[in-house]
Amino acid sequence: MSISSKKLFFTSGLALAMMSMAPAGHAQTVSENLTDVRQEVQIWTTYALNPYLRASSLKASVKNGKATLTGSVPEDVNKELAREIAMGVQGIKEVDNQITVDTDKTSSQHAPAGSYGETVDDATISVAVKSKLLWSKYTDGLNTTVQTKSGRVTLTGTADSKAAFDLAGQLANNTRGVISVRNLLKITPVANAEVAATSSSTGKPAGSVMPTASMAKAEQTVSDVWITTKVKSTLLYSSNVSGNDVTVTTVGGVVTLTGKLESGAERALAIELAQNVKGVKSVHAMDLTQTKS
């Protein structure tokens, strides 16, 4: 059943009101109806979030633990997936799968713009990008707003150096689910002056090092548990690293990566992402191997 949030709140509220006013003999029936609605909403929400089913406009109705599914999908595997999702809902004992397979539909079909599932995807991407920027030792000082629409990320605000500007774009672009990045960050004059001053004192090209303020923040003591969590999360958010295949441990700010990745490029990126996390002093990756040379 395609249920909007407003309908859900209205239906649930009405059912609760009926329970409070109904005689004792009817209370159980009202409670069962409320359970049916809850299960229908859970099934629909999962369909709306699933990238393989959200475009199919599937419907589900539940009565006393029996779910009836209707609608059409492009392949048999989608029909079976819809059934498995319904069976996985607590309290569902039986599924009458009336979904039809329409081969004229394409598996590349997209959900309508602004759909519930797409909105959740965009919110998740924005949080992931913002988190990676906050956790990085080089970009945590940015004043950044992250907006995502249909997987397209826009960064606005200020960066304290050209290097921070570039890294913010790279971190966003390397986030799972991101289609494109529009980097509208403005490099402030103060940041440029700091970069120039640092460059002249170190002999390195402008933009190749972080401003003094950012470097000071990077030297702050951060707990090993915090570092491990953020490194692991950063790898999981990455679209080019199999984060689940990497084990992360931290002792005294020294991060050790173990596991097996597919390629040398993926391994190098995992190491780079770990090195960028605030509080990391060094990264040991001797036991992070690759299947391809």
Image: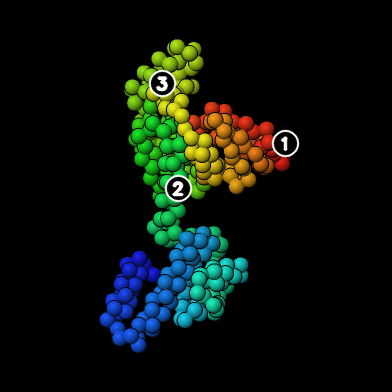
Q: Which residue is farthest left?
A: 21
The answer to the question of whether label 3 and label 1 lie on touching residues, with beta carbons closer than 8 A, is no
Q: State the separation of the CA atoms marked 2 and 1.
A: 32 Å
Q: Label 1: state its secondary structure.
A: loop
The residue singled out by tag 2 in the image is 125
Which label's residue is closer to the chain start, 3 or 2?
2
The residue singled out by tag 1 in the image is 293
Amino acid carrying label 3: it is Thr
Q: State the residue at coordinates (49%, 12%).
A: 203
Quadrant of residue 99 within the rendered picture: bottom right
Image x and y of residue 235, in percent: 55, 42
Q: Label 3: state its secondary structure.
A: helix
Image x and y of residue 163, in percent: 45, 26
Amino acid carrying label 1: it is Ser
Image x and y of residue 37, in percent: 40, 74
Q: State the residue at coordinates (47%, 32%).
A: 222
